[in-house]
Amino acid sequence: KTSQSDIVGTVQFVSATSIKITFDLTLAAPGTWDLLLTNPDHGTTTCAACFTVAGNTPTVTSADPDTLGRGANAVDVVLTGTNFANGATVTISGTGVTAGTAVATSGTTLTVPITVTSSATLGARNITVTNTDSLQGVCTSCLTIAPGPTATSVSTEQPSRCRDLTSRSARSWLIPTPASRPRSPSSRRRPRAPGTWSSPTPTSDAPPARAASPFMPRRRSHRWTRLRSARVSATRTSPSPAPALWIRPTFRSAAPR
């Protein structure tokens, strides 16, 4: 049959003038079919429109899935019923829902892609299957159209420890927060050695080149010198409630380590 797949039958030899042929017409399209006979010696003969496949009215009992939301795009829906033929078409009642090309995997199942627009009317729909001989089967309220998902707002969360990088003109940079690290025993400050200190003379409010320390490093490769005999005391002379006072010790004696 034109535009239909060939159906291979099982031949049983009866006599030189008679044979018995068995066909599986489960998915055969209704209408007239040609018969092509091939002998074991590869001789062939054709009988045009030798027999007619009578159509059976299809029935549709269910759909899976039976609910689709607005915006569904080409979702495969499996229809269950009887007498489905190759080339059958599927239609959905109402507007906003369309069915694609159906494929009959057997006489009882039919797979069809269904698309639902975002404005389709909500509620139940009927599904109609039409075979090639125009015989139809209808499944009432087999498919339900439901509301699709909606987004009402979008919120963003800004990291708490960095600046906004969305503006290119701002030329912002990430500012990492330094994490506290415990000091290793070797990096701890040595205890000050006991000793006496001399009274220094307060200088200006400007800080000295190096802050006063009981350990004064010498430049370059000289070893450290510990101030052992120095005495220091200071008094506030500035009327400011929080004066910035810097002192410079006077050395009496210093012994190298």
Image: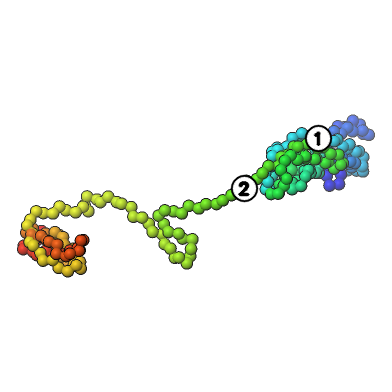
User: Hey, which quadrant is residue 128 in on the image?
Assistant: top right
Residue at image coords 42%, 53%: 160
Specify whether 23 is left or right of 123.
right
In the picture, which quadrant includes the N terminus? top right
The circle on residue 150 is: 2
Residue 7 showing in the rendered view? no
**How many discs mark residues in the rendered view?**
2
What's the amino acid at mark 1?
Answer: Thr
Taking the spot 16% from the left edge, 65% from the top edge, the residue there is 238
Is 24 or 130 nearer to us in this picture? 130
Residue shown at the point (59%, 49%) measured from the top left: 151
Per the image, the residue denoted by label 1 is 59
Residue 132 in view of the camera: yes
Which percent across, then down, holds residue 146? 68, 42
Could you say whether the residue bearing mark 1 is in a helix, strand or loop? strand
Counting from the top left corner in percent of width and height, residue 166 is at 49, 61
